[in-house]
Amino acid sequence: MSEPRALPPDAVGLGLRRALLDPLQAATPDAQGRQDFDFLECAPENWIGVGGRFGEALADLSARHPLVCHGLSLSLGGCAPLDQTLLLRVRRFLEQHRVAFYSEHLSYCSDDGQLYDLLPIPFTEEAVHHVAARIRQAQDIVGRRIAVENASYYAAPHQEMSEIEFTNAVLAEADCDLLLDVNNVYVNAINHGYDAHEFLARLPGQRIAYVHVAGHYDEADDLKVDTHGAPVKDAVWALLGEAYRRFGARPTLLERDFNFPPYAELVRELGKVRRLLRENSLTHAARDPHHARA
């Protein structure tokens, strides 16, 4: 089996979206060898078995750039048995493309069939055990650690514990990694009235595999909608910088799923991610005695 391609901690990436295929394929390093992006992220369900020009584009891009995969339909919080056929197909896809990370949402999206939405899991001890067992099973089938993403949610069906307590309990019991979505931390903190900075402070930094940053829609002062269809807001940029100061550099993906601007605007946002990585991870290194001794 081919080893996954490693990502440096200061790598920045974009989502592999069909609307962006032309500029992604056309992107070439500049005279100093610098690239617009260092890696691409795709949903494996959208690309497994795809042929024709889209399949050729995927093969071309994955040969030139490392891939990470972010699943959409595993439904880790669901009650129906995990789709083992899907997981085996995902495993082959990950191995074929030497995918660096495989992540999924800490949510559920199925009942008797796909619900085509990411729905919140009750924050209960029973749910912790249920979800952690499913994550362990999924990791066994794909043959690697999975990173679960802290998901945005707009209704809390039942809460015996806080979101951060639930998230940390799942990570510990499943012994899995975390995909830290900084925008989701901000959106949830506003919508549910908690402190985003305290949430970050309580995360187990050693489990953070990589980071998402995205834009959202301001429905009201106390209601933010996680859309991935707008530029990143200033408050989210600030929270991202705080995450780097606290945890150090991590590979970071700029999410944009629709309402695409000109490609050059996405590259400018990636440039801001690079600046925040450079400026704030240096602060982390200066404060971390283990880093200083390394």
Image (tube, rainbow, N blue to C red):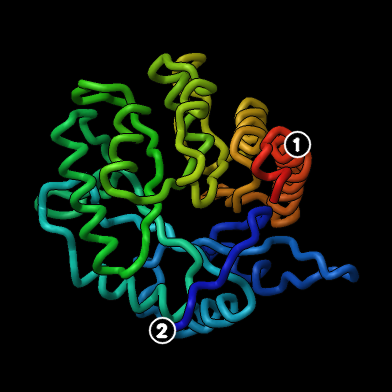
| Quadrant in the picture for the N terminus | bottom left
> What label does residue 51 carry, if any?
none
Q: Is residue 48 above or below residue 247?
A: below
**For the residue marked with disc 1, what is the amino acid?**
Ala
Residue tagged 2: 1
Query: Which of the two residues, 277 or 172, is positioned nearer the viewer here?
Result: 172
Q: Name the residue type under label 2.
A: Met
- Whether 63 is drawn above or below 241: the answer is below
Q: CA distance from mark 2 to mark 1?
A: 39 Å
Horizontal and vertical percent position of residue 269: 71, 46
Q: Earlier in the sequence, mark 2 or mark 1?
A: 2
Q: Quadrant of residue 188?
A: top left
Report whether 288 appears left or right of 4: right
Q: State if disc 1 and disc 2 touch (CB < 8 Å).
A: no
- For disc 2, the neighbor class at 10 Å (few under 14, some 14 to 19, many from 20) is few
Q: Position of residue 122 (x, y in %)?
A: 21, 30
Q: Residues within 10 Å of mark 1 (few under 14, many from 20)?
A: few
Lateral position of residue 273 relative to residue 225, left or right: right
Q: Position of residue 249 (x, y in %)?
A: 65, 46
Q: Does 114 appear above or below 245?
A: below
Residue 163 visible in rendering? yes
Q: Position of residue 72 (x, y in %)?
A: 34, 55
Say what secondary structure mark 2 lies in.
loop
**Which residue occupies 50% across, 51% down?**
209
Which residue is at the far right?
A: 31
Query: Given this view, does label 2 or label 1 mark the residue nearer the observer?
Result: 1
Q: Secondary structure at mark 1?
A: helix
Residue in the image at 71% along x and 46% along y: 293
| Residue 52 appears left or right of 271 | left
129 relative to 8 in the view: left or right: left
- Label drawn at residue 286: 1
Q: Which residue is nearer to you in this view: 73 or 81?
A: 81
